[in-house]
Amino acid sequence: MAPAPLKGILETIGNTHLVELDGLFPALNARVFAKLERFNPGGSVKDRSALSMLLGKIRSGELRPGRSTVVESSSGNLAIGIAQICRYFGLRFVCVVDAKTTQQNLAILRAYQATVEVVTDPDPKTGEYLPVRLQRVRELVDRLPDAYWPNQYANLLNPRAHERTMHEIAQALDGRVDYLFCSASTGGTLRGAAQYVRAHGMSTRIVGVDAVGSVLFGGPPGRRLIPGHGAAVRPELHDPSAADEFVHISDLECVVACRTLTIREAILAGGSSGATVAALEKLSGRIPRGSNCVLVFPTAATATSTPSTPTSG
Ligand SMILES: Cc1ncc(COP(=O)(O)O)c(C=O)c1O
């Protein structure tokens, strides 16, 4: 039976497909599933975080169409999620991005009528864009009347959204999720999934997937080119204990894994999805026979990943 009609585009957020990948690791005696977050209407897992951080404030009347301005710093996907919600409800959105944001994402944000501010100079001390972006957000929130900063790096409603992501996975597999591979940046997806697993007494082993050069799980900061997962500064939200173990994946490993995924499964996924594939491959020698392994794929591959300005950071 076809599903009943929904009331507006935002009701299509969540309930994404879980797809079995039986050609990805032919030698692995385990079942591998991917949670395809690309099927959210804004194209990524971050639609869930955006909705979770905004809907309560819109429903309570704290955010008022035509009067309030949402201000956020994002390298792309959360910004698209927020831009979609703000357009839907008639809220103004000022988005602070940086030179790593792709041309495609900038075009999408502008299509949703968001005001985009691109930070082009990194912080002179650290060489990172994030501190400059956050400073600009603070200035805007102080200056604009009726401004609200969801602050994805510290807002507990970000991980809360992903308790539902994990609930959907658990339901689809009748509660038998032996491994969850989840990439991290704000840590929202990872932390929310862990909260669900622990609250429901599940025995799922949660593997945090980080980028080489990211500081989330320790290790020195370094050059990273693939946007999405990893962080140059540890976000307030990030809870390292959310992961039972973590794996660092290089940019090259992401690219190789994305190619393998396309060739073996015809899934053209983003770099952070490839990272979870590479992480499973690294652990494959010790995954017990018959396990159910779930990989969270945050996005599809975008048509171009060219940053708006060439960058070394
Ligand atoms: C493409 C992509 N993958 C993974 C992540 C990590 O998600 P989280 O912020 O929930 O840790 C993000 C977050 O921005 C992302 O944009």
Image (cartoon, helix red, strand yellow):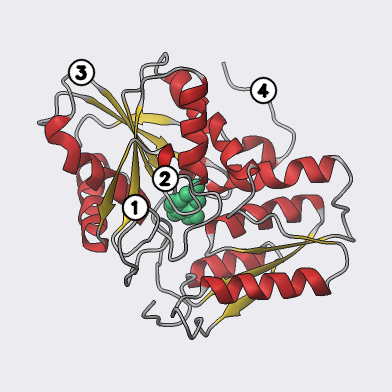
Q: Are marks 1 and 2 in contact (CB under 8 Å)?
A: no
**Residue 15 showing in the rendered view:** no
In this rendering, the label closer to the viewer, 2 or 4: 2
In this rendering, the label closer to the viewer, 3 or 1: 1
Which is nearer the N-term, disc 1 or disc 4? 4
Q: Which mark is residue 240?
A: 2
Q: Label 1, on which residue?
A: 210
Q: Find residue 34 and report its horizontal and vertical position in percent.
A: 35, 35
Disc 2: residue Cβ within 8 A of ligand 1's nearest atom: no
Q: Are marks 3 and 1 in contact (CB under 8 Å)?
A: no
Q: Secondary structure at mark 3?
A: loop
Q: Label 3, on which residue?
A: 290
In this rendering, the label closer to the viewer, 3 or 4: 3
Measure the C-alpha gap from mark 3 to mark 4.
Answer: 36 Å
In this rendering, the label closer to the viewer, 1 or 2: 2
Q: Find residue 101 and report its horizontal and vertical position in percent.
A: 49, 70
Q: Find residue 90 and report its horizontal and vertical position in percent.
A: 82, 55
Measure the C-alpha gap from mark 1 to mark 2.
Answer: 11 Å
Amino acid type shown at disc 1: Asp
Which is nearer the N-term, disc 2 or disc 4? 4
Measure the C-alpha gap from mark 1 to mark 4.
Answer: 39 Å
Q: Label 4, on which residue?
A: 4
| Vertical side of 228 occupied by 285: above or below | above
Q: Secondary structure at mark 2?
A: helix
Nearest the viewer among 100 and 110 is 100
Q: Secondary structure at mark 4?
A: loop
Q: Are marks 2 and 4 in contact (CB under 8 Å)?
A: no
Whether residue 26 sits left or right of residue 99 in the image: it is: left
Amino acid type shown at disc 2: Pro
